[in-house]
């Protein structure tokens, strides 16, 4: 039989084994087929990587916003909603969202960052609410994607759950559904026995951001970060864990944990809880803190909004230390980038308040990891657990992959991140706008001086992409 599948073999001195050791040898990748690992071998047919290069498991990022939405037919809209908006307005909203960002740009950004699989959020105009819309959205993403994407079903009051999946609660997302109290509880009851995740970025109960600004007049670069501080996160997490417990869900994942005390709150609760409490650490909190924002140019700092907010230096150090301890204890902890691309216009201030809080992050995943390895005593096996193995185990509970994921061995799914951690790196916005097919591209990392790490190749289900200079599929 003639096959048009092309195998590509890499030779590398630093293959990251699941045991935490490095080995030299070769790994072969063929689209749609499992990887083959040949330790100790060197053949003439392989791509020879530089001695300083590493070959690790592809990264799995369970938290991205790719913002694109499927467009329903009028019949689908009539049958599956949403009812509060007429068809034409819905389609207009979808077209607007889809013109600003795409699944394709998101996938190119993932590949640039060494990410082979992502989990996508459904806060889109025609979101994955209920089984029908969830499946339609998943199929739409499958069609546009360059890497496997798992679409998280969106929880809404009254919407049927998807058994065996992980529902995403936007009730506690600032700017999200704004659900409170009993409505949120009823929504969790629908997911009894199932898994749920949530954003922990609720507003303060006792003061609006406008009143906070008028009372304290903080530097505008810090307004957001000082309002959505640790106390807002602790209150949101506590309330959500209580709801989860009373509703009887089986697992509750806190998204983008921003500081040490928020992680500690979850770890403490997990010792007593009747349900699992996996923990997602916001990847960019490993790099950003409030002091660093003040060192940035104003306009760059102002695109660096996150909800929950960037921590103080002290809170950041506590998070970095506790994350390391927790992953070494074998806890279900992993990184999520919360890659959330918005246009520059959407990020402008309105009435003295910041606009959309998202930041583009996923394409700089490697540079965030390098920061931890170079400055905070993390090892590459720690990073492999946080960025590849643990998130793979988490999402494999909810989605069927063709082969085992989260393991670097013959027969497992061929997902690889190949990179050189020693190479200095600086953001080139114009080059990235073109490579990522993202005309609105702008980065919070622009102008950062001591970044390191160059992605060389990213492999997703055996498809090899060269990503160091442009992004090219090789097989
Ligand atoms: Zn998010």
Image: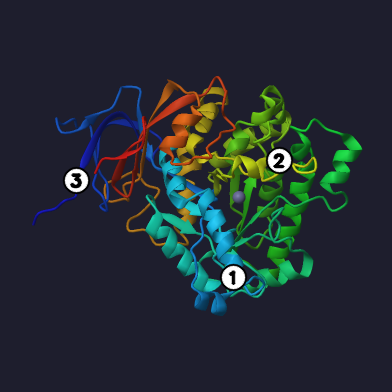
Please tell me which of labels 1 and 3 falls first in the chain.
Answer: 3
Which residue, given by chain and number where applicable, does mark 2 sit on? 309
Q: Quadrant of residue 123?
A: bottom right
* SS at mark 2 in the image: loop
Q: Does label 3 point to a residue whose CB lies under 8 Å from ligand 1?
A: no
Residue at (59%, 70%) from the top-left corner?
193
Colour approach in the figure: rainbow
Residue at (84%, 53%) from the top-left corner?
205
Residue at (29%, 47%) from the top-left corner?
462
Please tell me which of labels 1 and 2 falls first in the chain.
Answer: 1
Q: Quadrant of residue 210?
A: top right
Expressed as whole percent of the image width and height from the top left, the position of residue 317 reads 67, 30
Q: Does residue 118 appear in the picture of this structure? A: yes
Which residue, given by chain and number where applicable, does mark 3 sit on? 6
Q: Give the CA distance from mark 3 to mark 2.
A: 45 Å
* SS at mark 1 in the image: loop
Find residue 193 and name its label.
Answer: 1
Q: Does residue 379 appear in the picture of this structure? A: no
Q: Relative to the observer, which residue lies in front, 110 or 380?
A: 110
* SS at mark 3 in the image: loop
């Amino acid at each position: 039989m003639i096959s048009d599948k092309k195998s590509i073999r890499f030779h590398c001195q630093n293959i990251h084994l699941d045991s935490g050791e490095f080995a030299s040898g070769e790994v072969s990748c063929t689209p749609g087929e499992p990887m083959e690992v040949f330790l100790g071998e060197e053949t003439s047919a392989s791509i020879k990587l530089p001695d300083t290069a590493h070959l690790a498991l592809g990264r799995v990022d369970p938290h991205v916003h790719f913002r694109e939405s499927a467009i329903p037919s009028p019949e689908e809209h009539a049958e599956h909603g949403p009812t509060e908006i007429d068809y034409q307005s819905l389609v207009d909203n979808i077209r607007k969202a889809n013109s600003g960002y795409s699944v394709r740009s998101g996938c190119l950004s993932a590949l640039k960052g060494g990410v082979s699989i992502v989990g996508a959020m459904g806060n889109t105009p025609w979101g994955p609410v209920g089984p029908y819309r969830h499946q339609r959205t998943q199929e739409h993403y499958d069609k546009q994607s360059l890497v496997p994407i798992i679409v998280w079903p969106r929880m809404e009051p009254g919407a049927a759950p998807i058994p065996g999946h992980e529902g995403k609660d936007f009730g506690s997302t600032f700017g999200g559904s704004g659900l409170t109290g009993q409505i949120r509880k009823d929504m969790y009851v629908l997911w009894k026995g199932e898994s749920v995740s949530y954003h922990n970025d609720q507003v303060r109960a006792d003061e609006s951001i406008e009143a906070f600004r008028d009372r304290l007049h903080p530097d505008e670069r810090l307004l957001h970060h000082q309002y959505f501080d640790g106390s807002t996160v602790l209150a949101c997490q506590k309330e959500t864990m209580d709801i989860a417990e009373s509703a009887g869900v089986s697992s509750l994942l806190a998204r983008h944990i921003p500081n040490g005390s928020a992680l500690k709150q979850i770890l403490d609760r997990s010792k007593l809880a009747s349900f699992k409490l996996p923990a997602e650490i916001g990847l960019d909190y490993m790099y950003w803190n409030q002091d660093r924002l003040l060192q940035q140019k104003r306009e760059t700092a102002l695109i660096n909004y996150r909800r929950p907010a960037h921590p103080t230096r002290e809170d950041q150090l506590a998070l970095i230390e506790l994350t390391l301890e927790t992953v070494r204890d074998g806890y279900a902890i992993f990184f999520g980038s919360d890659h959330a691309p918005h246009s520059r216009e959407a990020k402008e201030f309105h009435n003295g308040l910041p606009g959309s809080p998202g930041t583009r992050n996923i394409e700089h995943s490697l540079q965030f990891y390098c920061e931890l390895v170079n400055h905070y005593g993390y090892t590459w096996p720690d990073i492999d657990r946080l960025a590849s193995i643990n998130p793979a185990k988490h999402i494999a509970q909810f989605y069927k992959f063709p082969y085992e994921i989260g393991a670097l061995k013959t027969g497992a799914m061929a997902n690889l991140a190949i990179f050189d951690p020693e190479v200095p790196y600086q953001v080139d916005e114009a080059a990235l706008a073109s490579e990522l097919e993202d005309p609105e591209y702008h980065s919070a990392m622009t102008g950062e001086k001591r970044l390191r790490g160059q992605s060389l190749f990213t492999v997703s289900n055996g498809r090899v992409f060269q990503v160091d200079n442009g992004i090219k599929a090789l097989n």
